[in-house]
Each structure stands twice: as C-alpha cells, then as structure tokens.
Amino acid sequence: MSRKRQVPFLSGRLDIWAAAVVYALGQINFLFDRSFEPYVSATNLCDYFGASQSTVSQKAKKIRDMFKMGYFNEEFSTERVQKDNPFNNLVMINGLIVPVSAVLKVLEKKESKLQTELELEDEDLETEEK
C-alpha cells in the first residue's frame, strides 16, 4: 500500500486500517462464510480490533479496489481457495466457457479419427507400391 501514489493509511487510525486489511483478505478467502474453516464473523473481527464494522468494511472496499482484489485472485487467495477454485477446470474457446474435460473428449475423438485416416493412407500407399 505504501507504493501507491495516495497512501490511504496515512490518514485515519492504524488499528482500523489493520482491521480493514484483514477484513479485505478475509472476504475474498471466505473467512466470513460459516461453511469454511477457519471461520470468524465480521462482527467478531471488528470487535477484536475495537473498530466499527461499517468503517472497517468501507476501508476494506478501498483496499480491494486499490489492489483489484477479487474472489479466486491468485495473488491474494489462500492455497485452499486457489485449489478449490471452480474456474480451474474451465477454458474459453471462441468466447464460450467450456469444461476442460469436454475439450479433452473432443480432442481425443479428433486424434482417434486422424490416426484412423493415417492408417488408411498407409495401407493405400502399401497397396500402390505392390
């Protein structure tokens, strides 16, 4: 944050900025989702830092915007979140999002067809040579 042109944490309380950093990272890593481990509520996190949740969430938004932080961002996501990323098995082909497995099946079919054609050509060449 200190490399940015406008350093936001130079004004305001440092404890609120510290809470906002943890809050921002927690948001994109599902820290506030009960179905994930570790879990902590946003209220408990803000209480720990002795800061208002609305103030912390506003500062966290500034941080997320400044660093272009989003869900499944490789630079800011935990290893577990990166590993469980549902987009890992998707590719874009001609503007369409497709599962990698579907692409692999198509490629396998094309490879098999090509091999069959090549084998037929080889047989034709052998027949012509005789």
Image (cartoon, rainbow, N blue to C red):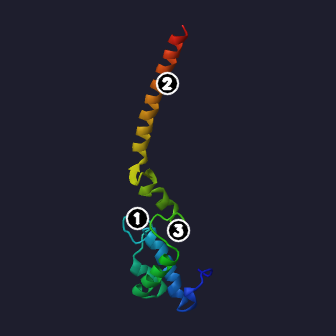
- Residue 110, relative to residue 61: is it above or below? above
The residue singled out by tag 1 in the image is 36
Where the C terminus falls, by quadrant? top right
The residue singled out by tag 2 in the image is 118
Label 2, secondary structure: give it. helix
Q: Residue at x 50, y 11 (%)?
A: 127
Q: Amino acid at mark 2?
A: Leu
How many marks are shown on the rendered structure? Answer: 3
Q: Quadrant of residue 35?
A: bottom left
Q: Amino acid at mark 3?
A: Phe
Label 1, secondary structure: give it. loop
Q: Position of residue 93 (x, y in %)?
A: 43, 50
Q: Residue at x 41, y 39 (%)?
A: 106
Crowd class of label 3 (few under 14; some 14 to 19; many from 20; radius 10 Å): some
Real-space CA distance between mark 1 and mark 3, rounded to the nearest whole angstrom: 17 Å
The residue singled out by tag 3 in the image is 76
Residue 59 or residue 91, whichever sits in front: 91
The numbered dot on residue 62 is: none
- Residue 27, relative to residue 53: is it above or below? above
Q: Earlier in the sequence, mark 3 or mark 2?
A: 3
In the displayed structure image, the side of residue 7 where residue 33 appears, left or right: left
Residue 73 or residue 53, whichever sits in front: 73
Q: Position of residue 48 (x, y in %)?
A: 47, 83
Where the N terminus falls, by quadrant? bottom right
Real-space CA distance between mark 1 and mark 2, rounded to the nearest whole angstrom: 52 Å
Return the residue found at the far right. Answer: 3
Label 3, secondary structure: give it. loop
Q: Position of residue 57 (x, y in %)?
A: 42, 82
Q: Residue at x 52, y 85 (%)?
A: 17
Q: Amino acid at mark 1?
A: Phe
Real-space CA distance between mark 3 and mark 2, rounded to the nearest whole angstrom: 49 Å
Q: Position of residue 113 (x, y in %)?
A: 43, 29
